[in-house]
Image (spheres, helix red, strand yellow):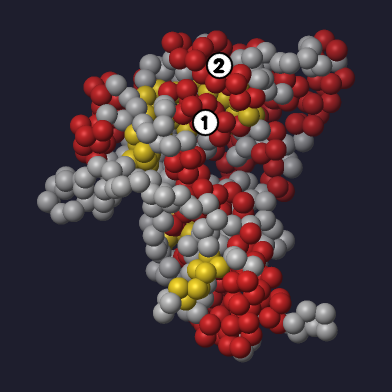
């Protein structure tokens, strides 16, 4: 709650609170501020104080007033949307209008909307565990004490450093690529070291693939719900985003087939294992049908296996079934080791490797060889494998506690709980609740962030590792009860 002080009035405090969230893009472009009366009730101040605070935000150019509708966050990167592309999807079974609407989605202000969650990674709403977080807690990752030890060993040994004062190998450290090839063989993906290229995190690997295989205007299929940053990244490159509904067994193949007939997409981006945000795993039957569709229509599949380190051993991967013919495998270590190391990699069909390498060289030249050598050491000595096993066990325990608390709070799971994330139906608009939960010191991930076009949604993604304590759920019940 706001507290009057000699130095700062309630109006100034309220205006600063909203301004900070708008500048951090935690309140995205187009978001509606609470009504004057509702904000006054929430903050325990008079309507006059709220009106004065909103006037300050108007003067700063952070919000705009819409007649008879209220105050909205301004779009600072306005783009003129092109004419609606494509036509409505025909119903696949019943003749009803498809929930996807038109084919070929361009997202006005999408970078602002989608990166709100990313910016949240660097915005500390409070010292409390954050339910919207996309990674394991720092306290968990600190258990990987072998990482700094490996770096010290590499830097202390001239033989192991191997030219650390010059640019690294263009494809990445040879020792790490060999270690990655062996690790991929453990999950039945056959990749030679010369097919593997290291990157600055998995995100750069996805970007390299897009910039190599696509040009502005190309249609790209993505899973919905899915990773909003990928939607925005493709949109920023000028691609036409084709959202494909993701179900428990995999993507909607009928929708994909229709896209192929109408638009001949060049690429499909998929998280086969522990899909973000639902936690779904691709079924073997759906995987075979998807690969047949790719072969028939000539598109590539980018398989993002970011959560593979915490996945069950039997999980189906397209790259294993396909043998890296039409698939490109992407992974990294941010979710299991050290996000700040930014070590990722991709494995591609041999005929694409040189083109992908050209794109990498044009963007970052090479990647940090000392960190790559240290990581190779951790993999070869089995430290990464043992650490991943401990994290899986700890996450299983946290998930059980978090699920119980969510159910007791009146939520239901829209997907079977699995992996790091839960896809929870709250029954209320989570965009609106995201603002209220920030007042409680919690950053949540509302469901609208995981759709190609932002719309009201009652779903939210929770991190099982950071929602296993009752404190968040007590605040949640209080806020929901006040709506």
Q: Is residue 361 left or right of residue 269?
A: right
Q: Position of residue 237 (x, y in %)?
A: 47, 36
Marker count (numbered): 2
- Name the residue beneath numbered marker 1: 207
Label whose residue precedes the other's in the sequence (1 or 2): 1
Q: Nearer the viewer, residue 138 or 132?
A: 132
Q: Residue furthest right?
A: 156
Q: Secondary structure at mark 2?
A: helix
Residue 169 to residue 19: above or below: above
Q: Determine which quarter of the picture holds residue 182.
A: top right
- For residue 357, which numbered disc appears in the image? 2
Q: Secondary structure at mark 1?
A: helix
Q: Is residue 41 left or right of residue 56?
A: left
Give the residue drawn at x 45%, y 49%: 79
Q: Position of residue 276 (x, y in %)?
A: 46, 45
Alpha carbons under labels 1 and 2: distance apart: 12 Å
Give the residue drawn at x 46%, y 11%: 350
Q: Determine which quarter of the picture holds residue 323.
A: top left
Q: Position of residue 387 (x, y in %)?
A: 66, 35
User: In which quadrant is the N terminus drawn?
Assistant: bottom right
Q: Position of residue 53 (x, y in %)?
A: 63, 78
Contact check, label 1 and label 2, Cβ < 8 Å: no
Q: Nearer the viewer, residue 458 or 10?
A: 10
Give the residue drawn at x 73%, y 41%: 143
Q: Is residue 190 visible?
A: no
Residue 389 to residue 358: above or below: below
Estimate how packed mark 1 is, as few (under 14), some (14 to 19) or many (20 or more) residues with alpha carbons within 10 Å: some
- For residue 448, which numbered disc appears in the image? none
Give the residue drawn at x 40%, y 36%: 239
């Amino acid at each position: 709650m706001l507290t009057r002080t000699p130095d700062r009035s309630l109006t100034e405090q309220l205006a600063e609170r909203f301004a900070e969230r708008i500048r951090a893009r935690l309140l995205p472009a187009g978001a509606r501020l609470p009504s004057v009366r509702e904000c006054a009730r929430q903050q325990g101040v008079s309507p006059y104080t709220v009106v004065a605070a909103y006037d300050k935000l108007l003067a700063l150019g952070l919000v705009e007033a819409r007649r008879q509708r209220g105050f909205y966050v301004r779009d600072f990167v306005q783009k003129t949307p092109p004419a609606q592309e494509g036509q409505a999807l025909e119903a696949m079974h019943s003749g009803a209008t498809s929930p996807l609407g038109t084919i070929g989605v361009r997202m006005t202000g999408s970078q602002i909307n989608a990166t709100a969650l990313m910016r949240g990674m660097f915005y500390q709403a409070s010292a409390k565990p954050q339910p919207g977080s996309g990674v394991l807690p720092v306290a968990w990752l600190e258990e990987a004490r072998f990482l700094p030890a490996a770096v010290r060993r590499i830097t202390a040994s001239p033989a192991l450093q191997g030219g650390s004062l010059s640019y690294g190998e263009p494809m990445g450290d040879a020792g790490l690529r060999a270690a990655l090839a062996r690790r991929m063989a453990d999950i039945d993906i056959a990749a030679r070291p010369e097919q593997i290229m290291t990157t600055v995190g998995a995100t750069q690997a996805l970007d390299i693939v897009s910039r190599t295989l696509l040009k502005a205007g190309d249609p790209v299929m993505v899973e919905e719900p899915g990773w909003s940053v990928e939607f925005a990244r493709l949109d920023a490159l000028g691609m036409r985003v084709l959202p494909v509904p993701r179900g428990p067994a995999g993507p909607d193949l009928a929708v994909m087939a229709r896209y192929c007939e109408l638009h001949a997409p060049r690429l499909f981006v998929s998280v086969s294992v522990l899909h973000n945000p639902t936690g779904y795993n691709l079924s073997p039957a759906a995987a075979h049908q998807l690969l047949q569709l790719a072969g028939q229509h000539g598109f590539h599949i980018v398989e993002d296996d970011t959560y593979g380190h915490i996945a069950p051993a039997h999980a189906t991967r397209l790259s294993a079934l396909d043998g890296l013919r039409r698939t490109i495998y992407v992974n990294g270590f941010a979710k299991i080791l050290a996000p700040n190391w930014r070590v990722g990699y991709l494995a591609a069909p041999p005929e694409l490797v040189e083109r992908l390498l050209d794109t990498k060289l044009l963007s970052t030249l090479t990647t940090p060889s000392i960190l790559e050598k240290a990581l190779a050491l951790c993999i070869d000595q089995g430290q990464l494998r043992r650490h991943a096993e401990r994290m899986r066990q700890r996450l299983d325990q946290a998930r059980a506690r978090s699920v119980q608390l969510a159910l007791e709070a009146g939520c239901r799971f829209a997907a079977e709980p699995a992996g790091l994330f839960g896809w929870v139906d709250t029954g209320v608009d989570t965009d609106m609740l995201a603002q209220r939960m920030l007042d409680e010191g919690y950053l949540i991930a509302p469901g609208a962030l995981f759709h190609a076009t932002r719309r009201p949604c009652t779903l939210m993604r929770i991190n099982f590792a950071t929602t296993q304590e009752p404190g968040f759920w007590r605040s949640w019940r209080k806020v929901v009860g006040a709506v």
